[in-house]
Image (cartoon, rainbow, N blue to C red):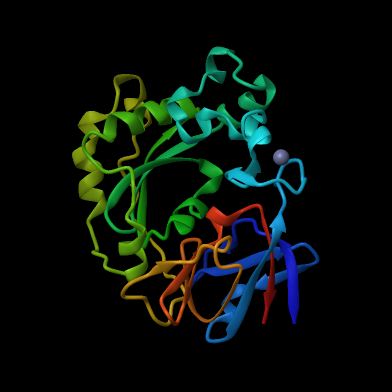
Amino acid sequence: MIYQGVLKKMMTENAAEILYYLDMNTDFINMNQLINKEITINFVTYECLNCHLEKKIYRQGFCKSCFFEIPSAADWIMKPELSKAHLGIEDRDLAYEQAVQLKPHIVYLANSSNVKVGVTRKQQVPTRWIDQGAHEAIEILEAPNRYLAGITEVALKDYVADKTNWRKMLKNDIEDVDLVAWRDKLKAFIPEEAKEYFIDDNVETHINFPVVKYPEKPKSLNLIKTPKYTGKLVGIKGQYLIFEDETVFNVRSNEGLVVSIEV
Ligand SMILES: [Zn+2]
């Protein structure tokens, strides 16, 4: 069986063990069913997720011109504290920015390799945590807009990491940390204007990934340099496919690549 399509991050479903789906244009692959099977991934070409032209991907699945023009790739996406829709100020497209930014946002603590702080839209919980490969996470603040969540994240970054170590996450070199204790410790550092949105009464969410064997020394597959790869899939964690030979492939960071997958 050969599937072909442009890579977009895998869709997930929260279950006792996370379920992963890959949308390949005409087919929808249940990736969990491929675990313990040999698959081949071939790089075919590029396809920008916005303009759909065959142009080299610059960032986030977009070609360079789309990345610098479209509202969904503006700076406030990666830096929520730059959000300005709550002031009625336009960045690239005010209607789009109001629709996205003026919705409830969550500041959370997630542990994938270490405890980190992050921001996501409320409707992206727990998807965001699954995508990061977090085995545990907790919401610590629910703000009415992206800006307040963003300034809270910036303030807390002085006391907790905001990055994860993907190798450590994939090796499953992890610890069970008391996130409630972390939340209570960080409360004092939330900015004044966001303090009223602190959540003091919820519990950790635990996430289980479908992995048969974790790699000891994960090596990342670069499909541009190695346009054909064959290996036995032994697990999926975050947005990474994990193979028996310790090769790992980050689907999300390869968005916009057209690939064929042979099963
Ligand atoms: Zn484009």
Residue 249: % across, % down: 50, 66
Residue 1 in view here: yes
Residue 7: % across, % down: 65, 59
Residue, far front: 225
- Residue drawn at x 35%, y 19% as measured from the top left: 193
Residue 144 in view here: no
User: Left or right of 139: which side holds 31?
Assistant: right
Q: Quadrant of the N terminus?
A: bottom right
Among the 4 quarters of the image, the one containing residue 28: bottom right
- Ligand 1, what quadrant? top right
Pick the front one: 171 or 224? 224
Q: In this picture, is 219 found above or below 244?
A: above
Q: Quadrant of the C terminus?
A: bottom right
- Residue drawn at x 57%, y 29% as measured from the top left: 74
Q: In this picture, is 223 found above or below 184?
A: below
Residue 30: % across, % down: 64, 73
Pick the front one: 24 or 56? 56
Pick the front one: 11 or 7? 7
User: Left or right of 242: which side holds 201?
Assistant: left
User: Left or right of 175: which side holds 262?
Assistant: right
- Residue drawn at x 49%, y 51% as measured from the top left: 128
Residue 112: % across, % down: 34, 58
Among the 4 quarters of the image, the one containing residue 12: bottom right
Q: In this picture, is 82 found above or below 118?
A: above
Q: In this picture, is 119 found above or below 237?
A: above
